[in-house]
Amino acid sequence: MTPSPPLAARVALLTWLVLATSLALDDQSGFRQVAELVAPVRRLLGWSQSWSMFAPNPPSSTYWLEAEGRRGPHWEPIEIAGGQPDSESWKLSYARASKLNRGLSTAKYNGDRRHFAHWLCRQDDTLSRVRFLHARLPTAPPGMAPSTGPIKRTPKSEHKCPGI
């Protein structure tokens, strides 16, 4: 007959099962109290992440890329996928088009913006130039309504359409 495991091993296994169950079911009402009790341990061991982990340093703004095209003497907005976030929905900020858009708004992607500008020119042969702007909307303080403006627009790059 095999000896039973030591008491310390049984307690460790029971503790692990309670923690694992609370991690898996922490949003269920019956386990919420257990999850709250073990929350300090989860944070200490790095077993939990949540949006509140950004609380001390929330993002200062939301940003996106905007495009304008020149037809004659005036610049006109060009709608591009993944532009200004939809205030009625959070889904756009996670869309692939929006991720590409935000990436193109950074300084190191000027070459990619040039290719994108040439593509936009091919879509509309009346364009002579395309320019991109980095649009930035400050984040509202916690507990306040979402920010609606002012939107700060900074020119990123300007590109001549090929063949012009």
Image (cartoon, rainbow, N blue to C red):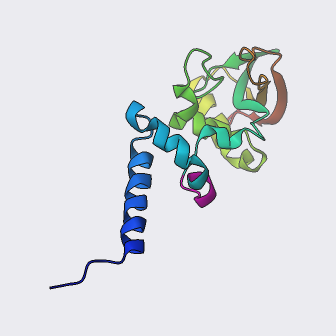
Q: Which residues are magenta?
A: 42-47
Quadrant the C terminus occupies: top right
Which corner quadrant of the image does residue 83 belong to? top right
Q: As drawn, is 7 to the left or to the right of 74?
A: left
Q: As drawn, is 93 to the left or to the right of 6?
A: right
Q: As drawn, is 36 to the left or to the right of 163?
A: left
| Magenta stretch prevailing secondary structure | helix
Query: For the point 72% across and 30% down, which residue is it?
Result: 62
Query: For the point 57% across and 14% down, which residue is it?
Result: 88
Q: Where is residue 86 shown, x and y percent of the image?
A: 60, 19
Q: Where is residue 152 shown, x and y percent of the image?
A: 84, 24
Query: For the point 65% across and 38% down, which residue is it?
Result: 52
Q: Nearer the viewer, residue 43 or 137?
A: 43
Quadrant the N terminus occupies: bottom left
Does the stretch in magenta take in 83? no
Query: For the point 71% across and 47% down, which residue is it?
Result: 109
Q: Nearer the viewer, residue 65 or 125?
A: 65
Q: Nearer the viewer, residue 104 or 43?
A: 43
Q: Where is residue 85 shown, x and y percent of the image?
A: 63, 23
Q: As drawn, is 43 to the left or to the right of 33?
A: right
